[in-house]
Image (cartoon, rainbow, N blue to C red):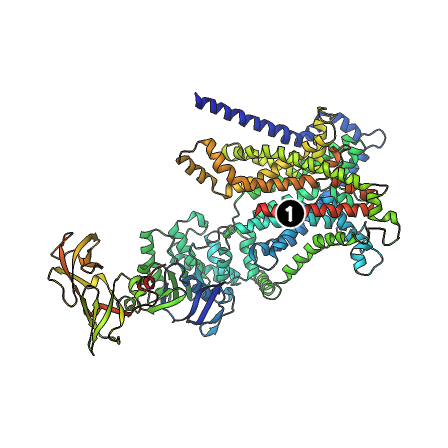
């Protein structure tokens, strides 16, 4: 019944703070993804949980046992490495039975479990193949079988699908999820691929600069991004700068440059406050030109592309801001380049943030 | 037309390099073998049916061979026991003083061996060494002390360990550096203790390095002459026997012994070389089952050792380095001052360094002359070897027969040096082609033989390590001709490797004793001079000269570090 807790964990490499005061709680049978751009501290966090690195501060608990200074071999984990790290000098059987063997299990038990695991990842019959004789997908499944045959309930995955090509990655994504569910495992999965994270996880921890930026279910991150960074990093957002001009119990009005006004739910901002406004392209409707109004922004179509089932427009507003819009491909009217249009905003789906101290561009920058 | 001309030029240079390679490296190495067949009659009557002593020569040959192989095998065994942990520490751990430790381990590679042997000799057998330090009135061991059980002389053994340990440590460490640490990490996440991880993962993956390190160390120990002569006392190794017999004009016995040494070392070493080239793989299905109990016991021991005794390997390895390298050098440096004006024990002025070096014996003049000879021989032979080695590197990487050339190049490295010296002497010297008499030119010809492979190997490593082919190809796509590519891409990229090889070859040549003894005639080199001093019991002079050698090699080590960084 693995239950993993990180309490105020910090890890430094020289002057670089790789993991900065992170607290997390992964409950039994949860599938949690650590998501972030490279260098955000997600892999370091995973390595701290595995015991491959020791934190400078903070406590790590697995099943309420303090494992902060326990070496990896005594933590009872399963770890799938980015490039699998299958032992090149051992065949698949040697790799799969490695964990039970070095833990001194009885040969009969070892054999039974290893066979079961290989069966599960559909690699029975390839026991005497060496890693370099297996395809990328097979190596990935072999790595999984090896990690699981040590009898763990806690699976740690470091970019486990990163080395595969796009199509296979998507297939194995679902396979991996199903497997974890069937075996009733707890999984912590590190990835930089937000689509992978959104489709596979119960919970997502978005990390940035060693800190937890936001944690929640995929839907929460998508519909309630708590920072401009999340609004930009998860999915896509248009950003506008503005000043709060009026607010009452229900509504708040924001003026953006060019004399345009946005109305949204009031959310504790004060009049005169400088704010950043994020609007997702899929929550903007493109309409025939009808001028400017509150939540109605006029502009000119500057670019248009078809992506799969949607049309993506980029509309230049009168104030020179560029707004992206996603519109279903079957919508009746198509707007040509250069055509004047009005964009209708959904007041329920406008995210307003205090204007970031470091500047908006810096605040949303994905490094 | 121009193309044809170029191609012809290419062919000519290819043939001339190959011819020079054969004449300067291959034929001199193997000539002593042919000697056995062409002069079989003479050898037979000298060794097996001598009218005066019967087969006494044959008995002696057998005795020295058995003795030498025993010493070498035992040395390599010991090297591995301490060298593998040392290589592991250097490859996997970060700690304060790591660079210093690396330097100390490399030191025996650059110190001329006779100086090193002398340092060991006085450390263990005289009151100036450990004995005095422990308050005894004599050295702590006797010159003739045998290690009980195996009957290997202690001093020869400890000198050989000191001299061969760097080969084992550096080769295994290089191989361990190549092994991605992620495999060890993976093993630990699967529940293996550090020692179990080492046994199951790193050790098998580093096995090729362990094999080639052992081969190098074995060959080095077998051929070691300079230091061994200084500490051997009454014992005679095969290498020393060759030198002695050449001096006694027993050419037949010497060459037959050389022939046997070469043959036996090939028989032992070449199969190992072949193994090194193979991929390390173990099939789990084929692995024998030892039963649950035994396995559990091994794992428990490993667990206990990993958790409780993990410092033992560090300490033990460091103690070995201290005993074999650091202490002898310190003892020599420390003895200079008390011996400066007079023998500190007898009080005799004639037993002081001043008297022996600058007084009537005038060893200083001899030392300076020997220095000139040594440096000239080392520079010229390194220069010739470099001129030959650089084109050889390209031949080895460009042509299909390059692999053959590369394996042939290993031969001079595994031929015992005194056998090599004898071979060169028999080929070029008065009893052979009669082109070169013993003296500095014959020293140079001898040193070229082992210098070429010493330079080629690091250059090839640089070539393979720098993705040179990729850069060459991109230079070609940018419009560079083959010649431009060589000048602007290939040679600059292998330059570091070549330089490292040049320094190694230079120091090797400077310290070489076994072969040099045989071919030097009256042009004495510094290391041979030190042996002569010890044999003449001119200890203070030897002390001074050894310090001098150590100082010179420290400078060379510094240069080596600069270049190989």
How far across and how far down the image is residue A127, in percent? 44, 52
Left or right of B140 on screen, residue A52: left
Quarter location, residue B476: top left
From the image, which quarter does the C terminus of chain A lie in?
A: bottom left
Left or right of B338 on screen, residue A87: left
Assign a secondary structure to mark 1: helix
Residue A201 visible from this viewpoint? yes
How far across and how far down the image is residue A130, in percent? 46, 49
From the image, which quarter does the N terminus of chain A lie in?
A: bottom left
Q: Is residue B394 above or below residue A37?
A: above
Quarter location, residue B136: bottom right
Residue lying at the far bottom in this picture: please name it: A249
Q: Is residue B444 above or below residue B100?
A: above
Left or right of A40 on screen, residue B488: right
Circle 1 marks a residue in which chain?
Answer: B
- Write down the residue under mark 1: B557
Residue B153 visible from this viewpoint? no
Residue found at x 66% / y 42%: B507
How far across and how far down the image is residue A70, in percent? 51, 68
Q: Nearer the viewer, residue A276 or B51?
A: A276
Residue found at x 40% / y 63%: A42
Q: Nearer the viewer, residue B217 or B115?
A: B115
Left or right of B80 on screen, residue A367: left
């Amino acid at each position: 019944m693995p239950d993993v807790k990180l309490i105020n964990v910090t890890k430094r490499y020289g002057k670089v703070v790789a993991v900065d005061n992170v607290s997390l709680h992964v409950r039994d049978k949860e599938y949690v993804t650590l998501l972030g751009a490279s260098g955000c501290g997600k892999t370091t966090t995973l390595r701290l949980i595995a015991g491959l690195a020791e934190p400078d501060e903070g406590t790590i608990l697995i099943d309420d046992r303090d494992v902060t200074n326990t070496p990896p071999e005594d933590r009872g984990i399963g770890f799938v490495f980015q490039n699998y790290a299958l032992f090149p000098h051992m065949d698949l059987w040697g790799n799969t039975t490695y964990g039970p063997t070095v833990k001194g299990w009885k040969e009969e038990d070892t054999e039974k479990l290893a066979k079961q695991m290989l069966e599960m990842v559909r690699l029975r019959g390839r026991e005497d193949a060496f890693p370099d004789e297996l395809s990328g997908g097979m190596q990935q499944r072999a790595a999984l079988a090896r990690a699981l045959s040590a009898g763990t309930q806690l699976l740690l995955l470091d970019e486990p699908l990163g080395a595969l090509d796009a199509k296979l990655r998507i297939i194995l994504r679902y396979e991996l999820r199903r497997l974890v569910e069937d075996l009733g495992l707890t999984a912590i999965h590190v990835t930089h691929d937000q689509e992978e994270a959104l489709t596979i996880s119960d919970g997502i921890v978005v990390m940035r600069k060693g800190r937890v930026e936001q944690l929640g279910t995929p839907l929460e991150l998508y519909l309630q991004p708590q920072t401009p960074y999340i609004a930009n990093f998860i999915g896509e957002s248009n950003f506008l700068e503005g000043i709060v001009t009026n607010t009452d119990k229900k509504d708040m009005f924001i003026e953006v440059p060019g004399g345009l006004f946005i109305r949204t739910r009031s959310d504790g901002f004060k009049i005169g406050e400088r704010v950043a406004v994020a609007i997702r392209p899929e929550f903007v409707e493109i309409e025939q030109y009808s001028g400017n109004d509150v939540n109605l922004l006029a502009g000119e179509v500057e670019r248009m592309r078809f992506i799969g089932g949607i049309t993506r427009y980029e509309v230049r507003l009168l104030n020179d801001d560029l707004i992206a819009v996603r519109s279903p491909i079957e919508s009746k009217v198509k707007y040509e380049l250069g055509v004047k249009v009005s964009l209708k905003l959904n007041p329920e789906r406008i995210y307003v943030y205090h204007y970031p101290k470091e500047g908006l561009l810096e605040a949303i920058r994905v490094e | 037309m121009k193309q044809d001309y170029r191609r012809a030029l290419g062919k000519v240079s290819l043939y001339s390099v190959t011819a020079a390679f054969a004449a300067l490296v291959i034929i001199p190495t193997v000539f002593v073998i042919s000697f056995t067949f062409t002069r079989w009659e003479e050898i037979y009557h000298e060794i097996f049916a001598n009218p005066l002593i019967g087969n006494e020569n044959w008995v002696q040959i057998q005795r020295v061979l058995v003795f030498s192989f025993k010493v070498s095998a035992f040395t390599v065994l010991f090297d591995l026991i301490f060298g593998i942990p040392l290589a592991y520490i250097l490859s996997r751990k970060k700690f304060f003083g790591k660079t210093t430790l690396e330097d100390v381990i490399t030191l025996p590679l650059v110190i001329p061996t006779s100086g090193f042997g002398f340092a060991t000799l006085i450390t263990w057998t005289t009151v100036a060494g450990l004995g005095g330090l422990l308050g005894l009135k004599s050295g702590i061991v006797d010159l003739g002390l045998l290690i009980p059980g195996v009957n290997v002389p202690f001093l020869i053994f400890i000198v050989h360990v000191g001299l061969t340990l760097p080969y084992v440590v550096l080769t295994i460490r290089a191989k361990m550096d190549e092994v991605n640490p992620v495999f060890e990490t993976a093993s630990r996440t699967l529940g293996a203790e550090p020692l179990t991880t080492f046994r199951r993962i790193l050790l098998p993956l580093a096995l090729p390095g362990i094999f080639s390190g052992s081969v190098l160390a074995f060959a080095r120990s077998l051929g070691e002459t300079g230091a061994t002569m200084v500490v051997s006392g009454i014992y005679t190794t095969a290498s020393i026997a060759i030198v002695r017999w050449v001096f006694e004009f027993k050419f037949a016995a010497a060459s037959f012994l050389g022939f046997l040494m070469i043959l036996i070392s090939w028989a032992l070493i070449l199969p190992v070389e072949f193994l090194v080239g193979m991929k390390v793989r173990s099939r789990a299905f084929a692995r024998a089952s030892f039963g649950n109990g035994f396995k559990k016991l091994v794992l428990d021991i490993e667990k206990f050792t990993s958790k409780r005794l993990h410092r033992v390997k560090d300490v033990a390895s460091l103690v070995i380095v201290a005993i074999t390298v650091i202490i002898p050098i310190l003892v020599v440096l420390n003895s200079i001052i008390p011996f400066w004006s007079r023998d500190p024990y007898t009080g005799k002025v004639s037993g002081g360094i001043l008297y022996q070096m600058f007084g009537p014996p005038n060893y200083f003049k001899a030392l300076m002359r020997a220095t000139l000879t040594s440096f000239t021989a080392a520079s010229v032979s390194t220069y010739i070897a470099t001129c030959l080695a650089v084109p050889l590197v390209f031949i080895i990487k460009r042509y299909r027969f390059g692999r053959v050339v590369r394996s042939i190049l290993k031969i001079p490295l595994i031929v015992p040096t005194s056998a090599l010296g004898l071979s060169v002497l028999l080929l070029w010297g008065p009893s052979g082609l009669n082109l070169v008499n013993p003296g500095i030119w014959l020293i140079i010809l001898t040193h070229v033989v082992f210098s070429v492979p010493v330079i080629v190997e690091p250059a090839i490593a640089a070539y393979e390590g720098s993705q040179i082919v990729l850069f060459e190809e991109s230079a070609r796509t940018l419009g560079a001709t083959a010649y431009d590519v060589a000048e602007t891409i290939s040679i600059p990229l292998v330059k570091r490797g070549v330089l490292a090889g040049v320094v190694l070859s230079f120091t090797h040549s400077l310290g070489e004793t076994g072969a040099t003894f045989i071919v030097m005639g009256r042009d004495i080199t510094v290391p041979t001079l030190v042996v002569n001093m010890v044999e003449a019991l001119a200890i203070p002079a030897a002390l001074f000269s050894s310090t001098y050698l150590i100082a010179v090699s420290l400078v060379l080590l510094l240069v080596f570090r600069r270049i190989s960084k």
